[in-house]
Image (cartoon, grey):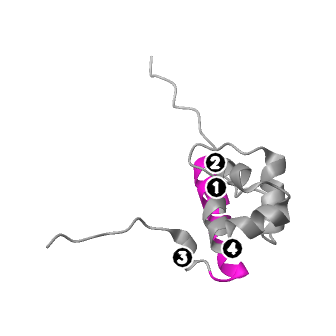
Amino acid sequence: MALKTLPFDAAVFIETPEDAAEFLADAFESGDPGVINAAIGAVARAKGMSELAKEAGLSRPSLYRSLSEDGHPEFATVMKILGALGMTLTVAPAPAREPILDPPAPIA
């Protein structure tokens, strides 16, 4: 008998606004636009795409296209979606990085 598996869907585990906020914060910390878009998509599915589209003032097909794997939503669209999810976007200083030192000079 073959073992059947299902694709992982984070939306199943996002049950509260706090879950959604933590999941999105982790995605934004990655700095990867694809990861961020996928995380917003998972939170959107957890809330319900139809309801979210209505609250964001977007059509359902437009919302699906924006949050698809190949989607590249405009910043205004991302802000509408986050607002409809009850989220805000906050900016904070990045942690200090170690300075890059010049390599030692070659010995002549």
> What type is the residue that disc 2 sits on?
Pro
Residue shown at 65% from the left, 78% from the top: 19
- Label 3–label 4 contact, CB within 8 A: no
Q: Where is residue 29 in the image (x, y as percent from the top left)?
A: 65, 59
The label shown at residue 12 is 3
Residue at x-position 81% and y-position 55%: 58
Helix, strand or loop status at disc 3: helix
Query: In the rendered structure, are the residues bearing label 2 and label 1 in contact, judged by CB atoms less than 8 Å apart?
Result: yes
Under tag 1, what secondary structure? Answer: helix
Density class for disc 2 (Cα within 10 Å; few <14, some 14-19, many ≥20) is few
Residue stretch in magenta: 15-39
Disc number placed over residue 36 in the picture, else none: 1
Picture quarter containing residue 86? bottom right
Of callouts 4 and 1, which one flags the residue occurring earlier in the amino acid sequence?
Answer: 1
Query: How far apart are the alpha carbons under marks 4 and 2?
Result: 21 Å
Q: Residue 33 carries which label?
A: 2
Q: Earlier in the sequence, mark 2 or mark 3?
A: 3
Q: Estimate the spatial distance between the alpha carbons at disc 2 and disc 3, rounded to whole Å.
A: 22 Å
Queried whether the magenta region covers residue 24, the answer comes back as yes
Mark 3 or 4 closer to N-term? 3
CA distance separating discs 3 and 1: 17 Å
What kind of residue is marked 1?
A: Ile
Q: Which residue occupies the extreme bottom position in the image? A: 16
User: Circle 3: is it few (<14), some (14-19), or many (20+) Cα within 10 Å?
Assistant: few
Q: Name the residue under label 4.
A: 47
Q: Nearer the viewer, residue 88 or 14?
A: 14
Front position among marks 2 and 3: 3
Point out the image quarter for the C terminus.
Answer: top left
